[in-house]
């Protein structure tokens, strides 16, 4: 149904969690996958060995390193910007530098990577960013800066969809709700609170997010662009 055979795919932030599930799904679908990581060298090497994908160390917070990495992949069919960080806490207490580092990874990097990829992307290519339902709804205190970064992605995908639409390139955001990962473990201290906001009261599995990414990247996704694809068990309903 979703033939990714021969597609050249770069996943930014693919060593763990949702990104790793996307690397596995796209590799299983026949794509040629490369993925970046920041610090998790062992996890990245293990995933590369398991899937045949290529692991590249590149910090998304370093704009020049990031854009050079994207450019070095040549002609891409699919870019998935998954790398993201989460800084939660009282805005009066949070370190400004920590907030700015999150903005670098969650906002600046998706924009510059998407533009760099589009310079040489094939017609009918795909740009997929991993946003969050928190771009729409932040139902607890301490998440203002994180929610701000994910809302910023919404404007980016709407605008870039129009910039690249004449080449058939689609640009979309997947907006997960709570999803089991190192960032947000299903058995973590916040789990019960998060489930209280949901219609389906469990964390998503990273594979469920990866299936949506594969759909958007595949041939059936060709008319979906400028959209926010929320997959959150009703967190935002
Ligand atoms: P994890 O923390 O489990 O994994 C994050 C991945 O991103 C890792 O592969 C990590 O690499 C990579 N990464 C982080 N920072 C950088 C960086 N500066 N440069 C390169 N790679 C980096 O997170 P999740 O899988 O949970 O989250 C993935 C995305 O999904 C994020 O954008 C997050 O905001 C979003 N999201 C997650 C939700 C959840 O509940 N889990 C809900 C909604 C959205 P390394 O291993 O090297 O550190």
Image (spheres, grey):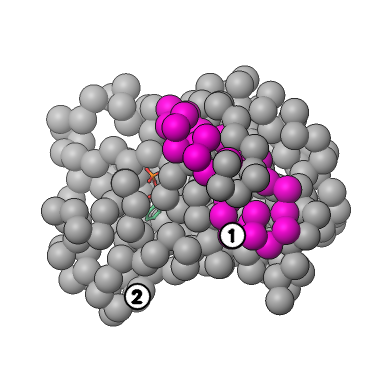
* Image position, residue 113 (x, y; %): 64, 36
In the image, 122 versus 9, the foreground residue is 9
- Mark whose residue sits in front, 1 or 2: 1
Q: State the count of labels.
A: 2
Query: Compared with residue 158, is residue 218 higher up or lower down, i.e. above or below?
Result: below
Ligand 1 lies under 8 Å from the Cβ of mark 2 = no
Is residue 124 part of the magenta span, yes or no? Answer: no
Q: Secondary structure at mark 1?
A: helix
* Image position, residue 2 (x, y; %): 70, 70
In the image, 152 versus 127, the foreground residue is 127
Instruction: Please give left or right for residue 84 compared with residue 66 in the image.
Output: left
Q: Quadrant of ligand 1?
A: top left
Quarter occupied by residue 118: top right
Instruction: Tell me the magenta residue range.
Output: 23-48
Residue corresponding to mark 2: 234
Give the distance between the C-alpha atoms of the residues marked 1 and 2, in whole angstroms: 24 Å
Query: Compared with residue 15, is residue 188 higher up or lower down, i.e. above or below?
Result: below
Residue corresponding to mark 1: 25
* Image position, residue 1 (x, y; %): 71, 76
Instruction: Please give left or right for residue 63 compared with residue 71 in the image.
Output: left
* Residue lying at the far bottom of the rendered structure: 199
């Amino acid at each position: 149904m979703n033939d990714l055979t021969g597609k050249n795919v770069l996943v930014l932030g693919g060593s763990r969690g949702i990104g790793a599930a996307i690397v596995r799904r796209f590799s299983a679908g026949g794509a040629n996958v490369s993925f970046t990581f920041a610090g998790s060298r062992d996890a990245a090497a293990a995933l590369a060995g398991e899937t045949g994908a290529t692991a590249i160390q590149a910090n998304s917070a370093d704009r020049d390193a990031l854009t050079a990495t994207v450019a070095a992949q040549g002609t891409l069919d699919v870019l998935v910007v998954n790398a993201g960080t989460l800084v939660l806490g009282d805005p009066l207490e949070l370190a400004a530098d920590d907030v700015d580092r999150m903005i670098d990874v969650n906002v600046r990097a998706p924009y510059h990577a998407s533009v760099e990829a589009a310079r040489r992307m094939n017609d009918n290519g795909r740009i997929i960013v991993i946003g969050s339902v928190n771009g729409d709804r932040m139902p607890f205190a301490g998440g203002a800066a994180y929610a701000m970064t994910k809302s910023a992605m919404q404007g980016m995908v709407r605008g870039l969809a129009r910039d690249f639409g004449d080449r058939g390139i689609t640009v979309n955001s997947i907006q997960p709700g709570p999803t089991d990962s190192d960032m947000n473990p299903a058995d973590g201290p916040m789990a019960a609170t998060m489930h209280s906001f949901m219609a389906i009261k469990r964390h998503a599995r990273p594979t469920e997010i990866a299936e949506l990414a594969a759909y958007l990247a595949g041939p059936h996704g060709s008319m979906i662009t400028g959209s926010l694809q929320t997959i959150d068990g009703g967190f935002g309903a």
